Image (cartoon, rainbow, N blue to C red):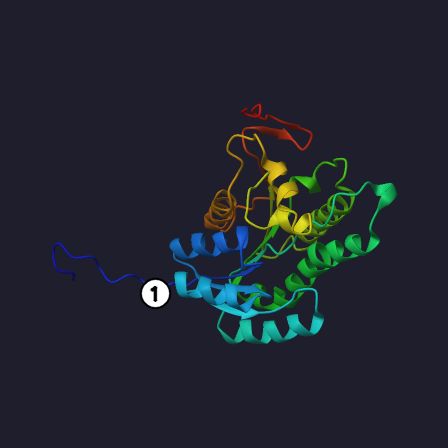
Amino acid sequence: MTTPGTDPTPATPTKRAVVTGASSGIGAATVRALIADGWLVTGLARREGRLAELAAETGCDYVVADITSPDSVAAAVDALTAHGPIHALVNNAGGALGSDRVDAANLDQWQRMYELNVLGTVRMTNALLPALRETAGSIVVVTSTAAHEPYEGGGGYVAAKYAERVAARTLRLELVGEPLRVMEIAPGMVHTEEFSLVRFAGDQGKANAVYEGVPNPLTAADIAEAIRWSLSLPAHVNVDSLVVRPVAQASYTKTHRLPAQS
């Protein structure tokens, strides 16, 4: 019984999610959205200072790890599984580097993008699959609309994201018959504090130009809500692929921009 006019004691969360790339942008926003929805969340990223700030803000747990390092992921998985059952893995860590044409490709950047976006996602997924099988859990892979259509100057990123998408789709086929969900969320133009800045090696002018004149690009919170919603659906519902763009962006090569003000 509860006293009239008082709120009942909140139920203890029973679902737990691991979110990679949680130190900023979509990852940090996803931690916030899932905690607000009643999840226990462990954020994973390389930057401990950022994770500690997020933990102080939200009450999440965190584990410091580099998903491109097998040893780092192995140590992280030991820590993650020690925290209790895992019901969802959100593979959000990723990123773009450069905007060279294919005939002028910086192969070091291509390799780094592949290691982060593709191998990192597969490494984390494979490492946590045993734990997810125990809970009939969910795997979310945050790709990009770059995984669905090419664009000039995006060859390395497109190749990496397409490979990440295909890996997720193949896993979905291979897991049919098991009570596991594999979901892809593919964001279009999202204005976060770091994505374009990292892509252009800290050049703020180039980063700002990506969004210049675009009315209302997506925010990290918009994509976090798509992830939260997908995970909130009944266990028999699988969001195979969800493309999310701002209204101003019809495709990578067709985006409405307002004229510059004089």
Viewer-proximal residue among 238 and 204: 204
Q: Residues within 10 Å of mark 1 (few under 14, many from 20)?
A: few
**Rendered location of residue 115, percent (x, y):** 74, 59
What's the residue at 82%, 50% (across, down)?
106
Q: Secondary structure at mark 1?
A: loop
Residue found 49% across the figure and 53% down from its top: 30
Q: Is residue 7 visible?
A: yes
Residue 148, position as x, y percentages in the image: 70, 38
Q: Which residue is mark 1?
A: 12
Residue 5 sits in which quadrant?
A: bottom left
Name the residue rendered at 67%, 58% in the picture. Answer: 121
The extreme left residue here reads 4
Q: In the displayed orientation, state which residue is furthest to the front.
A: 262
Q: Is residue 12 left or right of residue 43?
A: left
Against 233, residue 121 (above or below) is below
Find residue 113 and report its image quarter: bottom right
> Residue 62: x and y, percent?
50, 68
Three-letter amino acid code at the position of disc 1: Thr
Residue at image position (38%, 54%) is 36
